[in-house]
Image (cartoon, rainbow, N blue to C red):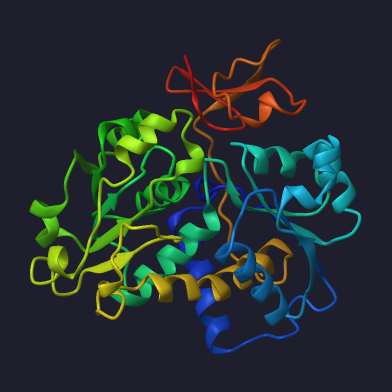
Amino acid sequence: MKNIISIKNFNKNEILEILEHAKNLKKFPKTDLIENKIVATLFFEPSTRTRLSFTSASFKIGGKVLGFDSPDATSLKKGESLRDTIKVTEGYSDIIVMRHLRDGAAKFASEISSVPIINAGDGANEHPSQTLLDLYTIKENFKSIDNLTTAFVGDLKYGRTVHSLTEALSKFSGQKFYFIAPNEIQIPKEIQKELDLKGISYQLLSDYKEILNQIDVLYMTRIQKERFENPSLYEKVKNSFEISKGTILNKCKENMIILHPLPRVNEINIDLDNTKHALYFEQAKNGVPVREAMIGIALDKLNINFSKKETQYSIEKSSINLCQNQNCITKFERTENKIILKNDEKFCYYCGKKIN
């Protein structure tokens, strides 16, 4: 049994092994890989691609699927806790794929579940399965993930796909990042500090036009209305970026690719859809073999050579909940009050946010 909660738990070689498994499953399908296993998909937050591709992946490798796609159809409406939902569901399934609106929910679930948990997105925190399919798409296109320049555009504060992909790309050599967003939704300072510690080059910008000819991967994101606590701030930044043929073609590198975790709103004009740069629909399609590999690994049906990780932090218990993140799972469930001590700073054990 292997939980897949965070891309931070994998090193470069382990990521490449997962991608190789995905490539092999796409080329040589294994329709009985998880035969007679039941995959529970618990989606407490709306999803199209992630939920459907995990379902498709499960069917393609011989599994059966049960679950829900809205909390409105569950006992959550009656006040049931996430803890109890997990404890009940583990009795009906062999593995749980979960998306939740609270940061750190997947980590919490992994600590109380007797079956493996795959994080399908937890609040504004992480989205490891999206990251792996992003990396798969990049590798298929460039043949290597090393020595790339990536521009992240849009909602970088709340964008869990951006947070996870930045972490993953940082494990590969020769990376350079541009973070392009209004100041109000720029990349979090904790991520900037991590990049500084790793010696990775990055710049914070408010526009992408002047650097188009330097970019290998243009990673667009929508401005996520549902994450904003202040509606007026959303109104201020919602139309910050829109790319189209007129703004991209003949100004970008010949082999630049455009990725987007989807859904899009108005940040990518449909006139780009049939250009050679637009890979976002292929990217979504790649979610199936990647998630087949993830399920297979979590259920010990596929092997990867996990290396022993040397932790560079310590964990301490506290008498009170110190996390200041109001969307952290610790604000909604009974959890242990644990903190991570790293580089003389404190972080929440569950959501990873810095504790001031």
Q: Is residue 109 left or right of residue 221?
A: right
Q: Is residue 186 visible?
A: no
Percent of width and height locating residue 7: 51, 50
- Residue under the image location 77 percent in, 25 percent down: 334
Closest to the observer, 298 or 253? 253
Q: Is residue 53 depicted above or below 352 in this figure? A: below
Task: Please provide percent x and percent y for residue 172.
Answer: 34, 55
With 283 as the anchor, is 197 left or right in this view? Answer: left
When the figure is inspected, residue 221 is found, relative to residue 53, above or below; the finding is: above
Residue 228: give x, y in percent of width and height: 46, 34
* Residue found farthest to the bottom: 28
Please say if 202 is above or below 267: above
Instruction: Give whichever of 15, 215 is nearer the camera.
Output: 215
x and y percentages locating residue 148 in the rendered image: 24, 60
User: In this rendering, would 81 be left or right of 102?
Assistant: right
Indicate the quadrant where residue 137 lies.
bottom left
Residue at 65% x, 74% y is 57
Which residue in the rendered view is the most extreme toward the top? 319
Tell me where residue 255 sits by quadrant.
Answer: bottom left
Q: Is residue 268 visible?
A: yes
Number of numbered discs: 0
Q: Residue at horizontal 48%, vertical 62%?
A: 132
Quadrant occupied by the N terminus: bottom right
Q: Nearer the viewer, residue 224 or 148?
A: 224
Report whether 199 appears left or right of 323. left
